[in-house]
Structures are given as C-alpha cells and as structure tokens.
Image (cartoon, rainbow, N blue to C red):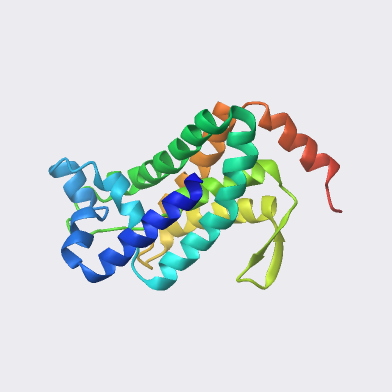
Amino acid sequence: MITKIISVIVFLVSMQGFNDRSLFERFKHSPYRVVHYKEYYRLLTSGFLHGSWVHLLVNLFVFWQFGDFVENFIFISVFGKVLGSFLYLLLVLLAIVVGNIPSTIKHKNDMYYGAIGLSGAVSAILFSYVLISPWSKIYLYAIIPIYTVVAAILYLVYSQWAANNSRDNVDHSAHFYGAIFGLVYTIAVYPAIVPYFIERLIQNFPF
C-alpha cells in the first residue's frame, strides 16, 4: 500500500512540476540553497520531482515492481502491517535524503547545480530486493537477462565511476549511496536476512 501511495504522490507532484516551473525550482535539490539558506526540505522534496516523462515513468515502473514486493515480503510479513509499513516508509524517505547528501557536500558552493528524482529510493529498494532474491533475473533495457546480485555489483561499480567521471548531469552518487543505504537499513532492522541471503546465494547458485 505504501508503494502505491508514494507512486501516486510522485506522479502527481512530478506532473505539477512539469507545468509549474516555480514549484520545480522551489523544491528541487539545490546544494547551494540547502547549505547557504538552510532549505533542508529540498533533500526530501527533490525525490518527488522528475525532469521528463521518461525519467518519471522509468523510476515509477521499477519502484512499483520491486517496492511492492519488498514492502510486503520483508517489512509487513516480518513486522506486521503497522510497524512494517512505517519501517518501509522510513526506508524510502531516508534513502532519498541520504542519496542527496554526497552531492550536497560536493556542490555546496555551486549555485547552478540541481538534481531531482526518486532514484536514491529506487536504488535502495533494488538492493533490499537483492537480499531476498539474489539469483532472480532482471532484464537490462528490457532485453538482456542478468542476475540481480550480478546487476547489483555492476551497478555499484558503474555508479561510483560515473559519479567521479561522468558529465551527463545525472546524480550518480545518489544512486550509489541510496543503494548502500538500502542494504545497511534492511540489515539493521532485520539482521536475520543476512543468513537468509547467504543461504539463497549458495543453494540457488545457478552454475
């Protein structure tokens, strides 16, 4: 349910941002304004904005597909409806904030830098999912099959490289740190998932 509610809110807010530039500018992630004007809310609100329909729909598709599974299989099944929903909501919201912190530090004096998108939370959800099902397959570009645990490792390597080398105006550090946060948070609230992950990793090894 939390996944669905967040998806609807992100969709509606992003749509409004497409049509209202002042709203977009007011709530996007701006490290300069976060640091110098103490507009800390931007660390969170930027996650509900997107730069294009493609950006929005891709993020929502992945978030909806994996988030609903993580929400129910880990959090609600283990902690119950109320506490599980709260812990899952906390994962999503904190992942947005944590994902934005590195770029805030890096670009704190750059008044022209801005970032938006749910990618930090999406990365957190994906890496939480890896702990449940490391050898399930996802399809890169909807065509190329790849095991989730392999995709996770490649994703971290690429995100770290791109954060230091890419000039494509994408906040790759949000992807990297969102993913790491997803792993750490899930393990912290539910330590028993570690032996479960190791067991699945060994027993379901496909080669």
Image x and y of residue 74, in percent? 62, 37
Q: What residue is rendered at 34% in x and 61% in y?
A: 12
Q: Quadrant of residue 95?
A: top left
User: Residue 5: where, in percent of width, then height?
Assistant: 44, 50
Q: Nearer the viewer, residue 164 or 65?
A: 65
Where residue 154 sits, quadrant-wise, is bottom right
**Residue visible at 51% across and 51% down in the picture:** 123
Q: Is residue 108 visible?
A: yes
- Quick one: 98 or 52, which is closer to the camera? 52
Residue at position x 34%, y 43% in the image: 101
Image spot of residue 143 (x, y percent): 67, 73
Report the number of discs. 0
Report whether residue 126 is seen. no
Tell me the quarter of the picture where residue 140 sits: bottom right
Residues 152 and 77: in front is: 77
Above or below for 34 versus 137: above
Check the image and report above or below for 24 versus 88: below
- Specify the farthest residue to the left: 37
Residue that appears at 18% across and 55% down: 26
Give the answer, above or below, for where 10 lies relative to 38: below
Q: Is residue 173 left or right of residue 71?
A: left
The x and y percentages for residue 72 are 61, 41
